[in-house]
């Protein structure tokens, strides 16, 4: 099972969450975006690990991973499972929480109006509670729970898993700059979300974010423990810029602005993902530039470059567009890139509109309406406006996927005392050509290939992997 098919989950959800909300209030509705938003949040609940609350909506999920961390004498219950697996990966999970927090900040009024803000905050807190546990010891961060190799040898619900819950950590002797910085970003962004509703909790998150950022800066090294599933191909400079940007937004302290201006590295890119965050930081810093911080003009230029690289009618366009109109950055699990790109286009569109600005791509100019139209077109593609005339969100729209590549959804509920035979689990459930017994409501699957072709089969993980929680 390919590495690119796992992390995309969390990111999607956050991104999609925000993006959809931006579209919902800003343009004519082609689909019921409010319903899609609600369902995407239900999917996040289906990814929860740990002791589930009484108001948990996916009734087919139960408590799981309650002894996580026991092998390291630490409590690591909680957090989110990755995609359709039973492993918890720190890097994609933290990116999911960061992006979800950004959604809550960028579209606070809209989320409040739809009644979904409490669910968004709950989703964020489920992640940050886990990060507080994972970072309870100074200069140590627990970054993974579960053995992915053994996990892939057993098709079993998390409630019945018996595979080893191996624990991986980073510390001064074995650093992991990307994961430490991304977790710092997640906690800094989330501290802003809770600033007016839970000040004590907000301060805890911010203090931990500061410590993790200092740890990431002082001990620079790429952590390869999550390879080959979550290798950082882009290096750690993007995460350091990303974390510093969120810390500056959370504190307004010169020390973080100084880092952004004098020490951080930036780059013009055409991707925003769990591995590559430059474009996200550039859009955030562009907002400050438009508000009068002129020292940030270079970041605004890089943000514009991102837009110019993606828009199909830009003279600098470099991202492949399928015949049906979907951007395609990877051969597998591509919908995560569709949603993350659409999210950034939506947020940057709002920033440009507020300040009366446009994006210049060579001799062509694009206004905020063009960016929003592109964001909407990408999301509409996933919801049904595509050559297959089907939705790629489970439980939504016309002819949605019914065989999502997901352990919890594809295996019937059984007693927690039941011991599953891993050898026969694939024959019993994974290879069964039938709809999942449980609807994985709100999950985007990996989606069609670069030619808009899609097959709804559980064993085709590149197309049918549930994409939402990293």
Image (cartoon, helix red, strand yellow):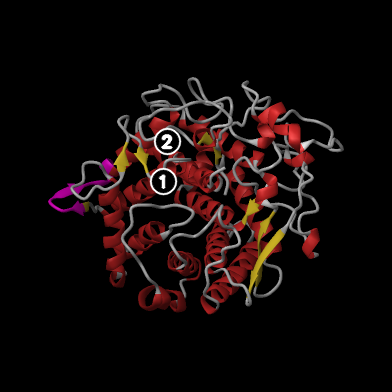
Mark 1 crowd level (few <14, some 14–19, many ≥20, 10 Å Cα) = many
Q: Is residue 170 left or right of residue 236?
A: right
Q: Earlier in the sequence, mark 1 or mark 2?
A: 2
Residue at the extreme right of the image, as rendered: 417
Where residue 377 appears, as percent x and y from the top left, is 34, 34
Residue at the image position 52 percent from the left and 65 percent from the top? 178
Q: Please say whether residue 48 is visible from this viewpoint.
A: no
Q: Is residue 6 above or below residue 139?
A: above
Image mark for residue 453: none
- Coordinates of residue 214 in the picture (x, y in percent): 55, 76
Q: How many marks?
A: 2
Range shown magenta? 360-370
Disc 2 designates what residue?
Answer: 24
Where's residue 239, x and y in %? 47, 64
Tags 1 and 2 in contact by the CB under 8 Å rule? Answer: no
Please tell me whether residue 119 is drawn above or below residue 295 in the rendered image.
Answer: above
Residue tagged by mark 1?
A: 343
Judging depth in this view, the residue of 233 and 214 nearest the camera is 233
């Amino acid at each position: 099972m390919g590495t690119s098919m796992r992390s995309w989950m969390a990111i999607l959800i956050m991104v999609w969450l925000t993006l959809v909300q931006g579209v919902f209030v800003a343009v004519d509705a082609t689909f019921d975006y409010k319903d899609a938003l609600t369902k995407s949040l239900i999917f996040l609940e289906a990814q929860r690990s740990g002791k589930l609350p009484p108001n948990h909506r996916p009734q087919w999920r139960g408590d799981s991973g309650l002894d996580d961390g026991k092998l390291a004498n630490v409590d690591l219950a909680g957090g989110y499972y990755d995609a359709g697996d039973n492993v918890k990966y720190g890097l994609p999970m933290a990116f999911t929480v960061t992006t979800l927090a950004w959604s809550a900040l960028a579209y606070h009024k809209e989320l409040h109006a739809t009644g979904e803000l409490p669910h968004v905050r709950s989703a964020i807190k489920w992640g940050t509670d886990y990060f507080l546990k994972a970072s309870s010891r100074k200069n140590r961060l627990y970054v993974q729970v579960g053995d992915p190799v053994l996990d892939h040898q057993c098709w079993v619900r998390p409630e019945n898993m018996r595979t080893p819950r191996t624990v991986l950590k980073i510390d001064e002797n074995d650093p992991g700059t990307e994961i430490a910085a991304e977790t710092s970003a997640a906690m800094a962004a989330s501290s802003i979300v809770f600033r007016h509703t839970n000040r004590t909790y907000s301060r805890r998150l911010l203090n931990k974010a500061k410590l993790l950022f200092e740890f990431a800066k002082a001990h620079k090294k790429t952590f390869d423990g999550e390879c080959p599933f979550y290798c950082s191909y882009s290096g750690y400079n993007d995460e350091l810029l990303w974390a510093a940007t969120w810390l500056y937004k959370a504190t307004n302290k010169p020390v973080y602005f100084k880092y952004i201006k004098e020490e951080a590295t930036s780059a013009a890119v055409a991707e925003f993902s769990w591995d590559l965050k430059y474009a996200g930081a550039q859009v955030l810093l562009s907002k400050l530039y438009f508000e009068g911080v002129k020292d940030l003009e270079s970041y605004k230029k890089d943000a514009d470059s991102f837009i110019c690289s993606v828009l199909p009618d830009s003279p600098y366009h470099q991202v492949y567009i399928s015949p049906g109109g979907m951007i395609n950055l990877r051969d597998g699990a591509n919908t995560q890139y569709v949603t993350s790109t659409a999210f950034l286009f939506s947020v940057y569109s709002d920033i440009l509109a507020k300040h009366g600005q446009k994006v210049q791509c060579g001799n062509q100019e694009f206004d905020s309406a063009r960016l929003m139209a592109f964001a909407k077109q990408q999301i509409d593609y996933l919801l049904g406006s595509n050559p297959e005339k089907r939705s790629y969100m489970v439980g939504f729209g016309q002819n949605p996927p019914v065989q999502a590549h997901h352990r919890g959804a594809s295996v019937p509920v059984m007693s927690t005392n039941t011991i599953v035979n891993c050898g026969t689990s694939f024959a019993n459930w994974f290879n069964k050509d039938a709809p999942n017994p449980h609807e994985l409501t709100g999950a985007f699957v990996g989606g069609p290939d670069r030619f808009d072709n899609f097959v709804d089969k559980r064993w085709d993980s590149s197309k049918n992997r549930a994409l939402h929680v990293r």
